[in-house]
């Protein structure tokens, strides 16, 4: 079984604030959110049946769309 790890080093409140900023089209905040979840997306991309680079790009796009939609 693989060891689960996370690269997120923010409190829940700080993360929520960063996501709110990203949702208002703040490009720096959006990039920070992507950076925070990149390692998890890389790990998940191994389970998608397409080239890893394409899978990673698809996951990043889905995250951006989710944030900008106001989920």
Image: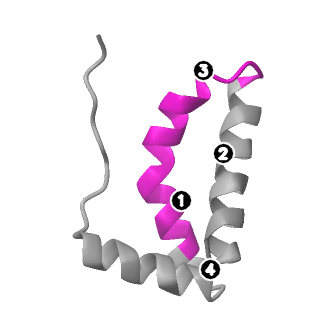
Q: Residues within 10 Å of mark 3 (few under 14, many from 20)?
A: few
Dominant secondary structure of the residues highlighted in magenta in the image: helix
Secondary structure category for the residue under label 4: helix
Q: Which quadrant of the figure has residue 6?
A: top left
Point out the frontmost of discs 3 and 4.
3
Kindly check if marks 1 and 4 are in contact, taking CB atoms under 8 A apart as contact. Answer: no
Kindly check if marks 3 and 2 are in contact, taking CB atoms under 8 A apart as contact. Answer: no
Compared with residue 38, is residue 23 higher up or lower down, i.e. above or below? below
Of the image marks 2 and 1, the number of the one nearer the N terminus: 1
Residue under circle 3? 47
Residue under circle 2? 59
Compared with residue 14, is residue 32 higher up or lower down, i.e. above or below? above
For the N terminus, which image quadrant? top left
Label 3 – label 2 distance at C-alpha: 12 Å
Q: Which quadrant of the figure has residue 66?
A: bottom right
Label 2 – label 1 distance at C-alpha: 10 Å
Secondary structure category for the residue under label 3: loop
Q: In percent of the image, x 76 and y 34: which residue is there?
A: 54
Of the image marks 3 and 4, the number of the one nearer the N terminus: 4
Q: In percent of the image, x 30 and y 16: which residue is there?
A: 2
Secondary structure category for the residue under label 2: helix
Q: In percent of the image, x 72 and y 55: which residue is there?
A: 61
Of the image marks 4 and 2, the number of the one nearer the N terminus: 4
Residue under circle 1? 34
Q: Is residue 17 left or right of residue 33?
A: left
Magenta region, residue range: 30-51
Residue 43 image offset from top left, x and y in percent:
48, 29
């Amino acid at each position: 079984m693989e060891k689960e790890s996370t690269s997120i080093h923010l409190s829940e409140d700080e993360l929520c604030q960063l996501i709110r900023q990203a949702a208002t089209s703040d490009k720096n905040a959006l990039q920070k959110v992507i950076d925070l979840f990149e390692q998890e997306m890389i790990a998940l991309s191994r389970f998608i049946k397409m080239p890893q680079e394409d899978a990673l790009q698809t996951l990043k796009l889905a995250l951006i769309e989710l944030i900008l939609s106001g989920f």
